[in-house]
Image (tube, rainbow, N blue to C red):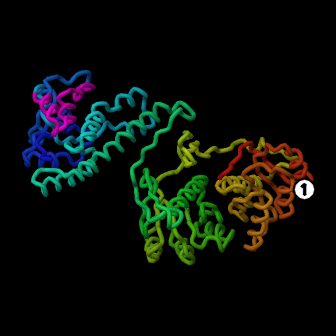
């Protein structure tokens, strides 16, 4: 389709001037609006103001300017339909062959921490989506551009085809429009619904980030959608896999629990070991000592710039991914020698406000949505349920275990000191089995559980789990409580002089 007339009205003016200049050089007549028209005129690009084209003034602070039959008739009429062409001619409606529109920055506006409802509503675009949808519906005749990143593609097609666009290009751009408007409307609906804990409907439209080689297994197709690049930057290594992305997410959520310098090792989204120390190399030694077998092919994360000494220690084993807020230059140079190792810079905290769409999982026939498990329990001194109160060191060890166990697949048991994990039992059908595995792991690693704290993600349904922990050497325990047999569990703790905290908060992870 030959481009003879274009309507340009954009909020984001990135790349617009060179694009419009080339259109004008190709003989395209340009109709424009408001600030866009002012910019084009200032740059010496001829354009017709929308009000001059429609014969109707912009009004109501610009709320009404493009909602006019001469605009939408020019976009929607079918060029190969004689009746449409005759009606357009009778009403002095000229064909508009190219629409260049991007929308008011609603999503950027509501991202501001102090945004008001009135400000958000004023940034709901009406005319823009209407023009985009009209043009996209009639893509067989109309080219529609909503992303400045597509300007050069459009120009190249025009150059190659004597001022015409191809059906393939128009179809691709039209699909992009409906993806964009769907996401835009979803953002509006979710914002206006945010006062409800879980709104009556749920909208989600995310841009493609990457087509992945495969999913969890080689026979499964997979892709990544959303805003991954706002959270992570890949500095080195081969492309990320589906499983890498899940592991990186789990590692980041775990690390957000720790403010002190900490290193964690994960495998299949479960922590293998976590250690804290002002010296990251020492933190690594504590984490690695928990389990020296599982970290092979694992994920390593720290919450301080990764040092050369830590890089040297890490490089002694095979790892899939290393994540840090930054890398010292010598550390980066050393780790880059491993060409397949992915090095990721963590750009932002992974925790989000407690909205219902914080965690989304697909199920048969739909999705489950829930807020993130980001609760921070306080006042634990008042939640001691045993006769003996924990010492300061025991309380610190319990808190360490508690921060880790909430990131271990249920049923989960973690034995810990105040600065490190000692044994981790994950994903067992029985809590006693999870404890047995954690004890076996500690023994296999040559770590003593004498004086340790034990953390359980959910209550001990029977006293046997707590008794097993005491026999292994634990002197204190932290768990949610809430079992019908709590009194039996507390009695068993008192009989063995254990200190125990019942937080009242469960941390299942399925």
Percent across and percent down for residue 242 are: 50, 61
Which residue position holds label 1?
496
Magenta range: 62-89
Relative horizontal placement of residue 138, taking residue 373 as reference (left or right): left
Judge by depth and name the residue closer to the eye, 211 or 170: 170
Q: Position of residue 462 (x, y in %)?
A: 85, 51
The residue positioned 24% from the left and 53% from the top of the image is 168
Say left or right for 488 vs 200. right
Question: As rendered, which of 434 and 424 lies closer to the eye?
Answer: 434
Tell how many labels: 1
Identify whether 431 is placed above or below 317.
Answer: above
Picture quadrant where residue 262 is located: bottom right
Q: Inspect this view and state whether residue 382 appears.
A: yes
Residue 85 falls within the magenta-colored stretch:
yes
Decide: is 429 above or below 109. below
User: In the image as oriented, which residue stretches furthest toward the front?
Assistant: 82
Residue that lies at the very extreme toward the right in this rendered image: 495
Q: Can residue 11 be seen at all in this image of the molecule? A: no
Residue sitting nearer the eye, 280 or 377: 377
Residue for point 68% across, 50% down: 508
Q: Secondary structure at mark 1?
A: loop
Q: Residue at x 21, y 40 (%)?
A: 99
Q: Is residue 504 magenta?
A: no
Across and down, in percent, residue 69 comes to 20, 27
Query: Mark 1: few, some, or many residues within 10 Å (few <14, many ≥20)?
Result: some
- The residue at the point 53 percent across, 42 percent down is 357
Q: Position of residue 467 (x, y in %)?
A: 87, 57
Relative placement, left or right, of 288 versus 17 is right
């Amino acid at each position: 389709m030959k481009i003879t007339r274009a309507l340009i009205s954009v909020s984001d003016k990135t790349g617009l001037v060179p694009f419009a200049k080339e259109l004008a050089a190709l003989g395209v007549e340009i109709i424009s609006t408001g600030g866009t028209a002012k910019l084009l005129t200032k740059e010496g690009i001829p354009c017709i103001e929308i009000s001059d084209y429609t014969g109707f003034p912009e009004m109501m602070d610009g709320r009404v300017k493009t909602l006019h039959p001469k605009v939408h008739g020019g976009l929607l009429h079918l060029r190969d339909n004689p009746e449409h062409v005759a009606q357009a001619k009778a009403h002095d409606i000229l064909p508009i062959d190219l629409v260049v529109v991007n929308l008011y920055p609603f999503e950027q506006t509501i991202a501001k921490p102090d945004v008001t409802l009135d400000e958000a509503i004023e940034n709901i675009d009406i005319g823009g989506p209407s023009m985009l949808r009209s043009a996209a519906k009639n893509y067989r005749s109309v080219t529609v551009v909503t992303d400045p990143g597509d300007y050069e593609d459009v120009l190249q097609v025009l150059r190659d085809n004597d001022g015409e666009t191809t059906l393939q290009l128009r179809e691709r751009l039209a699909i992009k429009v409906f993806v964009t408007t769907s996401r835009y409307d979803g953002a509006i609906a979710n914002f206006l619904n945010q006062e409800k804990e879980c709104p009556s409907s749920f909208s989600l439209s995310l841009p493609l980030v990457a087509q992945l080689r495969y999913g969890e297994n080689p026979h499964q197709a997979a892709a990544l959608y959303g805003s991954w690049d706002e959270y992570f930057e890949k500095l080195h290594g081969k492309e990320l896999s589906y499983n890498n992305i899940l592991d990186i997410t789990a590692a980041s959520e775990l690390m957000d629990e720790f403010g002190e310098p900490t290193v964690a090792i994960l495998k299949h989204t479960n922590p293998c070991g976590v250690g804290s120390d002002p010296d990251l190399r020492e933190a690594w030694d504590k984490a690695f000592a928990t389990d020296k077998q599982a970290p092979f092919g694992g994920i390593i994360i720290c919450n301080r710039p990764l040092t050369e000494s830590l890089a040297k220690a890490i490089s002694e084993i095979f790892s899939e991914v290393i994540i840090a807020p930054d890398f010292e230059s010598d550390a980066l140079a050393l780790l880059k020698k491993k060409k397949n190792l992915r090095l990721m810079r963590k750009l932002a905290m992974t925790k989000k406000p407690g909205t219902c769409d914080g965690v989304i999982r697909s199920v048969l026939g739909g999705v489950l949505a829930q807020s993130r498990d980001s609760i921070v329990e306080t006042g634990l001194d008042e939640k001691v349920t045993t006769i003996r109160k924990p010492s300061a060191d025991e309380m610190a060890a319990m808190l360490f275990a508690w921060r880790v166990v909430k990131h271990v697949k249920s049923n989960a048991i973690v034995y810990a000191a105040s600065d490190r994990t000692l044994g981790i039992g994950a994903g067992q059908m029985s809590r006693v089995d999870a404890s047995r595995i954690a004890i076996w792991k500690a023994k296999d690693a040559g770590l003593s559980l004498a004086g340790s704290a034990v953390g359980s993600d959910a209550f001990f349904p029977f006293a046997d789990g707590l008794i097993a922990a005491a026999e292994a050497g634990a002197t204190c325990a932290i768990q949610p409580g809430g079992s019908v047999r709590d009194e039996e569990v507390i009695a068993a703790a008192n009989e063995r002089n254990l200190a125990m905290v019942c937080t009242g908060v469960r941390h299942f992870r399925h």
